[in-house]
Structures are given as C-alpha cells and as structure tokens.
Image: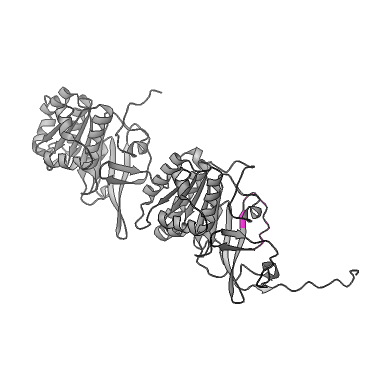
Amino acid sequence: MPERDLLKTGIKGLDALLLGGIPRGNIILAEGSPGTGKTTLGLEFVYRGITEFDEPGMIVLFEVSPDKLVRDAATFGWDLRVLEQQRKLKIIFTTRQVFGQEIQQADSLLLAAAMEMGAQRMFIDGLRWSALDTGGRAEAFHVLGEGFHREDLTALFAVDHPSGEPWLDQRAEEFVADTVLHLGIERNQRAVTRSIEVVKSRGQDYKMGIHSFRIVDGQGIDVYSRVQMPRGIEREQAAAYDPTTRISTGVPGLDELVNGGYFVGSATVVAGISGVGKSVMGLQYLAEGARRGERGLMITLDEPPAQVLRNASAVGIDFQAHIDGGLIRFWYEPPQEIEIDRHFNQIEDIVRTFKPRRAVIDSLSTYGTNLGPAGRIFRDFFHALVVLMKEYQVTAIYNHENPELLGMSSMMGDFTISSLMDNIILLNWVELGDTLRLGINVAKLRANPTPRVTRECEVVDGEGMRILPRPIASARSQLPFGAYRGLISRAPTRQPAPVPDENEEG
C-alpha cells in the first residue's frame, strides 16, 4: 500500500489527533462561533509550515487588518514581517466580493502570485458565501477547491457558525470539504474550556471525539487528546507483571502486612478520614525509594510543594537534597477549574520524561470533588491514570479521603473504583474509652494472601508512621487491639476471656 503524503500542521497535539497530519491537497474547514480560536489556528497552520517545514504560505484577510494580524502574531513570538521580507509569506487584505470573483478566474492573479512564491499553504480568514453564491454554495465551493487543487495548495478556511452548533445548520461546504474541524467552547457551570473535534477527514483515519485545547501566550495552540480515548494496546494491556520484586512501603511494620512490599507496577489506594496519616505514609514511601536511589513523583492537588516539604520535615524527612539530586519531584496543580484533558497530558509528559519508579497521588477525593466521583469523567480519568502508571511500571499509591469518622460502611464511598485497585489499605480511628487510637487493615491484596487483621499504628513527631507490634504492651495499661472485636465497625467490644478446658491436664 503506498505511503500517504501527509502535511503536518505543526500545531502541538493536533497532528496526533490526525495520526500524523492531513492528506496534502485537502480543503480544510475550521468552523465555530466567534472567539473559539479559528484565526489563531489558521495563522499557526501557515506559520508552522514556513518555519518548521519550509513550506511558503499565503494569508487572505477580509476584516482583520494585516497590521493587527502582525501585532497579534507577535504575542506568540511569531514575526510575520520577517517572513514577508524573506518572501516566504504573503498577506493579502481584500474584500470578499473581489476574492470571490478572482478565485473563479482561470487566470487568477491570486493563484498566480501563490504559484510564483511557491506557496503550499493558504489560510482564508472569515470567508462568507454570499460573494461566491452565483451557482449555489456547493458549486461555488467546489470551484474554489478546484483552483487550489490545480496549484497543489492545501487551504484552510475559517468559517463562522454564530450558534456554535454546526450540526443544527449543516452547510453545503461541509459536504464538499475534505477535512472539517469544529472548534467550540465547552461550559461547565461558570468555567469554560476550548474544544476541537475532527468531524471528518477524507483519506485518513483520525482520533474521534471532542478534545480540548488552549491558546498559550508565547507558544500558540496546544491540543490535548481527550482523557477517555484509548491510548493503544500496549498501555491498555499493561500490568504489574513482575511476580518476585517487591517495593518496600517505607513504613516500619507495614511490609510485613503486605507480604514484603507492593508488586512492581501495582496500584494501591490508602483510604481514611482526614488526619489519619495517609500523606505521611506517602511521604515515607517516597523517602524509602530515594534512600534506595529510586525516583519518586508526588502529584498533589491539596497542598503546594512548600507545604509538603514542611510536613515531611515534621516527620524527619528532608526531601530538598533528593529534589536537588533529581530523585524526587513534587508536581502541584490547583484543583479549581481543572481541565482534565490538559491535566492528564501533563502527567503523561512527566511520567514519560522523569521516569519515576514510585508515585503518590494526593488525593482522589479532590479529583472527585471537581469531576464528580460517580460520573464517567472521573472514572475514565482514573482508569487512564492507572493504566499509564502500569505501562511505565510505576508502583503508585492513591490517597483517598473516606468521609466516615468512626468505622467504615464502605471502603471507597461514592467512588466506584475498587475493582481497578490491586491493593486497598484502610486507616481509621478506633474509639476505646476516651481515646481515639489509629487502626490499619489491609482489606485487599490482589494475588496475595492477607490476614485482614486490624493492627494499631501511630504517627510520631520526627519519626513518621509505624505499625505497632501485636500484642501490644502499653505503658498506659491500654489493652491491645487483639482484646477487642469489631474494630472497623462503629462498636468495638471486648473479646470474652478464654474459658479453660476442664479436661486439660494441669
């Protein structure tokens, strides 16, 4: 099968949606309501062609003056005047009527100018069809396309859809065009996200669905594949396949409860109400990895890095040297108005480039608050995150705040993700007398036996968390956890004293 001649747009993330680019010579429509980024898309399409692929280009304007276009391009670091001086770019400011008449002429001066400069890309901004509608819109657009095809030009048209809903008002040009990109603005309560969808593209496969993008000062457009999209068979079938290597938890006494440590590439959720030590466990887990020369990543939505460093210092962990040495990385993003496609894309880049062996995500409940724990968006994001970590064989811990103070009626509350987890560790308070004591239970340990015995643990200033031995001999004469039953429930009760066997000798 002959190799396709694909024209790369050069726009970050867009060629990935198009599986490499757009078939050369396609007529492209970029449609959407005002403010969705159509002009920026077309401008960058031409600019990247010139600067990255040595493909001269032409821009046709009807409303925006060339001076304003040059000014706006400069905010992205694009110097259009220099490209004009190098005769690699030509900007034409005209009317729609003149353009409509000119483009249909066999001896078109516009196409002659494009041929003379060797233009391979053209962007027409804000074309309206009244100027071309002499024989019907479809016919006018077909004639327009034939002119570009003769000169081997790949042309992109920016077309306004005032309603922002092109499927409610399908136009003839959408059927004639080879590639149709719909740009929109997605509203989520008071927040907004720009979106892009490849509606069709003849001659190629592409990634379907609504994806998101940003317009970034100093860069241009940055497109992010939707988080729900499958990333390939290698990732979707990735698993914790090493049956022998164990990743130490870093918490004294916990390795014993999890059969020597976690499997490589496994996913562990630590669930419990705020204040039980989930973050402390995560910090000790990363510190243990750094001690062994393993890279560790902490993704946090709850606390900025400076606060995490302070908390680590309180339990005797100095991360700064490990950060300076490249073993530890903290990545924080405020959760307000989080754009989940972009957020996941950033995590993917960090995992691919930093290559951590351990990761802590703090916390799932914050994601759920912003995305909705019972909705598909959260579950799809979490599934994508788990399989990403497994593909790169990152052994990950996910902290989750279970809102129940004493006892647990469910391990994950509204979060229906238990089936995705390899291991589940429960932390909760146990009220005995007038004291809250901390209990830990390994509720799930996939492919491993576990006793599911509730053990007592404590967090000590300057030392961190540790699992206490069993039975415990306390200086305060407190009975050990083994003297009670129903510790995870809301009503722990004393175990009855063992009854001596009358037949037993002695």
Residue at far bottom of view: 434
**Image location of residue 421, percent across then percent down:** 55, 52
Does 445 lie within the magenta span? yes
Q: Quadrant of the N terminus?
A: top left
Residue 228 left/right relative to 89: right
Residue 397 shown left or right of residue 213 in the figure: right
Q: Give the mark count.
A: 0
Quarter of the figure with the C terminus: bottom right
In magenta stretch: residue 207: no
Residue 106 occupies quadrant: top left
110 or 78: which is nearer to us?
A: 78
Residue 171 seen by the camera: no
Residue, x 56% and y 70% (percent of image)? Answer: 406
Q: Which residues are magenta?
A: 443-456
Q: Residue at (57%, 65%) from the top-left corner?
A: 428
Residue 253 appears in the rendering: yes
Q: Residue at x 25, y 26 (%)?
A: 54
Residue 45, percent from left and from top: 25, 35
**Magenta region, main secondary structure:** loop
Up/down of 126 relative to 416, above or below: above
- Using the rendered view, name the quadrant where residue 337 is placed: bottom left
Report the residue at 78% width, 71% height from top: 498
Residue 374 position in % (x across, y down) = 46, 59
Q: Report the side of 352 relative to 448 (left or right).
A: left
Q: How is the image coloured?
A: one colour
In the rendered structure, the answer to whether residue 365 lies left or right of residue 498 reads left
Q: Does 15 sit above or below residue 54?
A: below
The image shows residue 323 at horizontal and vertical percentages of 45, 46
